[in-house]
Amino acid sequence: MLLTLDADRHETVLDGVIAAGLAGLLDADCGGIGHCGQCRCRVAGPAPAPTAAEGDLLTPQDLADGIRLACQLVPTDALRVELLGPLELRPSKAELAGQLRFDARPAVHKVAVTLARPDLHDQRSDWLRVRQALAGPDDGKAVPSLSLELLRGLPDCLRAQDWRVTGVFHGEQLVAVEPGDTTRRLLVAAVDIGTTTLAVYLLDLAAGRQLAVAAGANPQAAFGADVISRISAVIDSPAALGELQRLVAGGIQRLLSDAARRAGVDAADVYEIAVVGNACMLQLLAGVDPRHLAASPYVPGFNELVVVPASELGLSSFNPAARACLLPGIGGYVGADIVADILVTRLHRLPGTRLLIDVGTNGEMALAHNGRVVTCATAAGPAFEGAHIECGMRAAAGAIDHVSLDGEFRASVIGSAVPAGLCGSGLLDAVAAMVRAGVVERSGRLRPATDLAAALSERLVNRDGSTAFVLAGEPGGPVYVSQRDVRQLQMAKGAMRAGINILLKECGLAYHNLDEVLLAGAFGSYLSPESALAIGLLPPVPRRTIRAVGNAAGEGARLAAFSLPARDEAVEISRRSEYVELSVRKDFQEVFIKEIAFPDPT
């Protein structure tokens, strides 16, 4: 997409893109501070000299081709900029959900009736006629009042198809009256709002099945890769809250439109949307200021089940009568996504001891022991998503996603493309292989080339005065793991393990008490359990006890869309689960430091 920017405001191209309402067309994982190199654009014509950050993050050929970083480029004159756009993700959240199990009693249902035609002997009002017909002759229960908008359209609606109409109910509330029999057109949507990825599931209540799925990047990435960056943006500029809300609502609507188009249905027949996500993501969707999540005592604006008109969230693609149901969370950083994980895995109802981990920017976990559920969250950082890694990228075509060591290093690349970077699962595998091969010491230091066999030492290079290990050398430049990348992964895995250890301690348990370790989310499904054990991300449990459960959060959203009992159970999980705030634990730092080191290779 081409955009023309002027120099009147002396702002960066990224600022201009956001001001133009186009932030979803650029990624800026670092929040626009020149660290990630994701917000690439191409300029036509003269432009200011590259900044130091651009010199570090762009190759000479990039600069010769007019490639620049939108967060660094400040136009000094009118400038034409081509937005290169976010990468297409590999099949991820949306395609990892398992088979849905539910008691199909949805919140939304329809009732078709044929009304008695009025005459001089029956002059009941249109509203009373509808109300009595939908209540039923033997019910005696009054149908709640219509909205003013629907009341205004009622006369034409009743007469459009000779007094044959369909009432649409959300629970016991009548939310719409439609001409004719529309009972076969009853769609709902389930949405999983991840910090990195959005997934939308389109469901047909009348047929009891899923019609289509669509997934893509969360367009809020223009404000940073993690929740803290986005909260900071709101603190710095209150106007950012509205833009973040508009971005996520727009992203949901685009994915919904895509899913509806592929299913051959009309998105206007969607009457409800069930949404899961962490507390920050849900507050941003609702337009609720999340700043208090970033400061002690880390209190969310809401953590309860919230049902509001979808239109109030800017979701105009849905039916005007549609409701949005935001599922409840547990704590400030353990949100509705973990509640959905617990709901789907039945963690709270299974005997024995199970640990559920959603590995990501916010490392959320739940430990269940004979019905008791204790949860916590750690600030793992974006390394598991491939962000803030020198050759890091999302799990898109060209990303190295798996690395193995079988006498020599082998790397698999998404899309069988030329290696362009390293995603989170590839980083995990690469460091695990380097630990096993002795390239990385327990402390995390890369060994000198003189201490390694020739096949390994020749892969060690100097990058900006620091040692790096080359995984793939291609014409566009090598893909490597730097000493800094190893440290980033150490910090992330140390935080995760500290959280796991403290949950076990809270329940008086040890690693050997774990019957099962469940890995949730897209990253959890793609990571190698062997690699996770090798670097100490997971406790030393038998490999057979580790099981990936896919995108359980998305499946939980689908359950909530299909089933009121499932929704009620989610509320019960929220109420009964305990939340451990790690920031007040005096032992957290001690455990964290201990868990930074890698285990001895086995």
Image: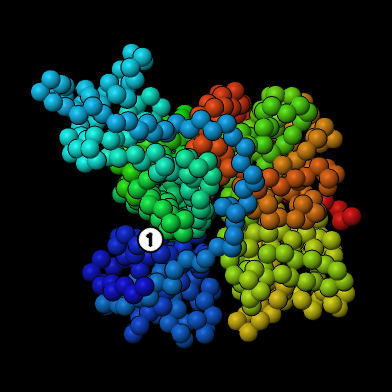
- For the N terminus, which image quadrant? bottom left
Residue found 69% across the figure and 80% down from its top:
473
Number of residues whose C-alpha sits closer than 10 Å to that of mark 1, classed few (under 14), some (14–19) or many (20 or more): many
**Viewer-proximal residue among 32 and 208:** 208
Q: Is residue 574 left or right of residue 595?
A: left
Position of residue 257 measured from the top left corner of the image (x, y, whole percent): 40, 55
Q: Is residue 319 left or right of residue 587?
A: left
Residue found 34% across the figure and 39% down from its top:
181
Q: In this view, does 515 lie to the left or right of 138?
A: right
Q: Is residue 450 above or below residue 357?
A: below
Asked if residue 356 shows in the view, the reply is: yes
Position of residue 501 measured from the top left corner of the image (x, y, whole percent): 74, 36
Hey, which quadrant is residue 517 in on the image?
A: top right
Q: Mark 1 points at which residue?
A: 23
**As shown in the figure, which amino acid type bears the numbered disc 1?**
Ala
Position of residue 59 measured from the top left corner of the image (x, y, whole percent): 54, 80
Q: Quick one: SS at disc 1?
A: helix
Q: In this view, does 90 lie above or below 538?
A: below
**Viewer-proximal residue among 547 and 465:** 547
Residue found 74% across the figure and 70% down from its top:
411
- For the C terminus, which image quadrant? bottom right
Hey, which quadrant is residue 541 in on the image?
A: top right
Asked if residue 332 shows in the view, the reply is: no
**Number of residue marks:** 1
Q: In this view, does 72 lie to the left or right of 101?
A: left
Position of residue 90 measured from the top left corner of the image (x, y, whole percent): 59, 63
Residue found 24% across the figure and 40% down from its top:
161
**Viewer-proximal residue among 172 and 299:** 172
